[in-house]
Amino acid sequence: MEAKKNYLSWSIRIIVSALFILSALAKLSKGQLLDSPYFAISTFEVKQLYTLGFSEGIAPYFSRTLIGIELALGLLLLQKNWLKRFIVPVTTALLLVFIGHLTYVTFLSGGNSGNCGCFGELLPMTPIEAIIKNIVAVGLLVYLYKLLPNASKNGNFWILTTVLFASILWIYMLAPIQPPASNFTVSALTETPQDTLPEVTQVADTLQKDIPVKKDSIAKIEIEIAKEPKKVKSGNAQFFAGIDKGRKILCYFVPGCDHCRTAAKELTEMRKKDASMPPLSILFMNEEADLIPDFFKDAGASYPYKIIEIIPFWNILGKGKDTPGVKYFWNGNEIKYYWGITDNKFNASEFNEYLHKSYDDLKKINPKL
């Protein structure tokens, strides 16, 4: 009987310990374990902590400390000191806090969509899935508490503090907090063949010369072209000076992102088929920036770009949004915005329709134009 209890006790400790250690390491990973700690932890801060009201000054410290605590608890579950009196209750309490937070987030979002961030970007998990996982873990810990004997001595508390501080310190060393840097760097590439392509009005003039039409039809075309949205500031002039003049496309890409490369390739194919397509510029996240030449090789063309630091990039992309991002501007007005790889992902055929909609048609979609 005692051997069975000991077997069950160790089984539960190993399972819950593995969950906590994996959760900590996943928050420091992108596609593989510990492949990009700073990127992963910065993404966790922007997508999870900023939404909770954490400031940019506090979030970096809270994220690293929290991940260090998770790692420490996972490790401490595998030792015997203060296990029943301290480690199991604290681990259970932390899980209950996570459950409360996830329940609140699910209630606010009105559904069960998006990644809760429990395992970072490495293993996406919806809030409901995370709640179920945490409830099961709490149940296992409650059962473990009953299985553990009441030790007359709790052991050496210094082991707990040593493991805790060592874990937190390791996280800070693995993903050091970087000092504030400029939000973007200017690319060497400032012009591409796309900038020499004719504007919409020039294309229309060419069509009028090649195709015989009635005078009243020509007047109608000229009036149609003349109609355009009022000029506004999009906030992107700091990156590209002419972004708010006429029709422009602005993309938000990560150099190593396969989905971003696919979107860029589709845009290049569209450009080859349609000379009237607006000029395209790119804001790259400063993550694997050395892959940018390879990115353009994959895309089939080079475009003007800027490199943006990780956290400012996520902020510019927009709350709750993901890459790849593709925006269509007309005189600084945001006409269409695609982002992520789910419901709002880039759709080349639909985007092509938006590019050819008249001002009147666009105004029916967005009366504010």
Image (spheres, rainbow, N blue to C red):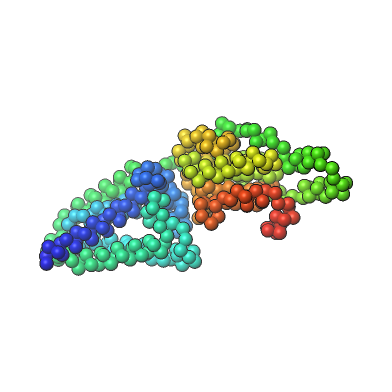
Tell me if 124 is positioned left or right of 209 in this view.
left
Using the rendered image of the protein, determine whether residue 343 is visible from the camera's viewpoint.
yes
Tell me if 94 is positioned left or right of 14 in this view.
right
In the depicted view, which residue is nearer to us: 116 or 300?
300
- Residue at 70 percent of width and 51 percent of height: 357
Q: Position of residue 199 (x, y in %)?
A: 72, 40
Relative to residue 152, is residue 292 depicted above or below?
above
Q: Position of residue 165 (x, y in %)?
A: 27, 49
Tell me if 21 is positioned left or right of 336 in this view.
left
Image quarter of residue 106 = bottom left
Residue furthest to the right in view is 215
Q: Quadrant of the N terminus?
A: bottom left
Using the rendered image of the protein, determine whether residue 245 is visible from the camera's viewpoint.
no
Q: Position of residue 217 (x, y in %)?
A: 84, 49
Image quarter of residue 48 = bottom left
In the depicted view, which residue is nearer to us: 343 or 183?
343
Q: Position of residue 44 (x, y in %)?
A: 42, 51
- Residue at 38 percent of width and 53 percent of height: 123
Relative to residue 359, is residue 37 depicted above or below?
above
* Picture mark count: 0
- Residue at 50 percent of width and 46 percent of height: 259
Relative to residue 171, is residue 297 depicted above or below?
above
In the depicted view, which residue is nearer to us: 342 or 336?
342
- Residue at 34 percent of width and 62 percent of height: 133
Residue furthest to the top in view is 188
Q: Quadrant of the C terminus?
A: bottom right
